[in-house]
Image (spheres, rainbow, N blue to C red):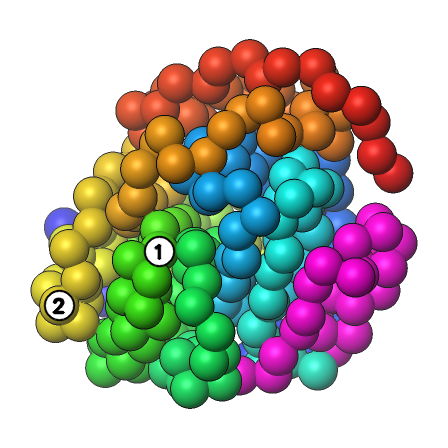
């Protein structure tokens, strides 16, 4: 039994240090990179050629721009409410030479199906739904995700952390990462990580939200991470992947995460590199 959830003090991340720390955490050697590498790899098996994906709560678009580099045939829409996050996202899209294939929209979780009128092949939300201040907000966000995906029976990929059984673990988990990585985390990101764990949904709470939103997804969890998803693992083609994006960086960590959640991590064919 977990302790009572402690919502984030702010639903929108605008603090400059927090935005910078979160952006840096998504770099290739950062703590979020294995999550992004795993997501890019599995989603590449689910999204059809020339597909359109939406990332809800995309933040600085570290994941979404990596996905577009990983799959050069895809186009994408990223949504967020934070002006500062979206500014970082636009810069990163330009730096990674994917700006022509990505659009950013300022939109609330619960209004994404109104803000985006197009049919999409996948709806993604990476570690953002714990920012919902309460259960009703979670259900509203999940309902909007369902409405958006149902237009084309698109895949859904909802990855988030799990609230631990004690507040002490919320402090211990980031410190354990520092010991394993032999590298200190920026204080702003470490505090945000702890706050996110305090605000996380338990698997049961998330699944209850899915039921209220009338969404039927497969659910797996391990190591304080949870994934709720739908789609076919044969809809995409790993031959479309540019496997030089991540190189060998994080392969082992991403493969371990994949295995803990019940996914394999097959080698992808070699194709030409990109920026």
The span picked out in magenta is 84-107
Q: Position of residue 187 (x, y in %)?
A: 70, 55
Q: Is residue 21 shown left or right of residue 6?
A: right
Q: Nearer the viewer, mark 1 or mark 2?
A: 1
Q: Position of residue 32 (x, y in %)?
A: 60, 42
Magenta stretch encompasses residue 50: no
Could you tell me which residue is drawn at 61 percent across and 60 percent down?
76
Question: Quick check: 189 above or below 259?
Answer: below
Q: Nearer the viewer, residue 144 or 118?
A: 118
Label number found at residue 154: 1
Kindly check if marks 1 and 2 are in contact, taking CB atoms under 8 A apart as contact. no
Question: Quick check: 191 above or below 217?
Answer: below
What residue is shown with label 2? 214
Q: Is residue 220 visible?
A: yes
Few, some or many residues within 10 Å of mark 2 (<14, 14–19, 20+): few
Question: Quick check: 51 above or below 273?
Answer: below
Looking at the figure, which quarter contains the C terminus?
top right
Magenta stretch encompasses residue 91: yes
Which element is circle 1 on? loop
Q: Position of residue 163 (x, y in %)?
A: 32, 53
Could you tell me which residue is drawn at 46 percent across and 43 percent down?
47
């Amino acid at each position: 039994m977990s302790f009572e959830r402690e919502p984030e003090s702010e639903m929108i991340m605008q603090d400059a240090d927090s935005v910078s720390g979160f952006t840096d955490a998504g770099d290739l050697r950062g703590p979020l990179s294995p999550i992004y590498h795993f997501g890019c790899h599995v989603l590449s098996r689910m999204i059809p050629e020339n597909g359109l994906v939406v990332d809800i709560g995309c933040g600085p678009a570290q994941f979404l721009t990596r996905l577009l580099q990983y799959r050069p045939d895809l186009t994408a829409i990223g949504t967020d409410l934070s002006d500062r996050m979206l500014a970082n996202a636009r810069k990163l899209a330009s730096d990674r030479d994917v700006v022509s294939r990505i659009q950013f929209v300022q939109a609330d979780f619960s209004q994404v199906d109104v803000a985006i009128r197009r049919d999409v092949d996948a709806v993604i939300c990476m570690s953002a739904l714990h920012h919902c201040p309460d259960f009703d907000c979670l259900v509203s966000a999940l309902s909007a995700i369902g409405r958006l995906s149902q237009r084309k029976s698109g895949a859904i990929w909802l990855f988030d952390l799990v609230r631990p059984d004690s507040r002490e673990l919320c402090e211990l988990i980031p410190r354990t990462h520092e010991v394993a990585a032999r590298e200190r985390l920026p204080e702003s990101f470490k505090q945000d990580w702890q706050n996110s764990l305090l605000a996380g949904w338990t698997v049961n709470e998330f699944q209850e939200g899915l039921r209220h939103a009338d969404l039927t997804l497969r659910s797996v969890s391990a190591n304080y991470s949870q994934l709720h998803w739908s789609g076919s693992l044969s809809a995409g083609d790993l031959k479309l992947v540019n496997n030089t994006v991540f190189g060998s960086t994080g392969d082992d960590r991403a493969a371990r995460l994949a295995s803990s959640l019940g996914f394999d991590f097959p080698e992808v064919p070699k194709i030409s590199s990109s920026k």
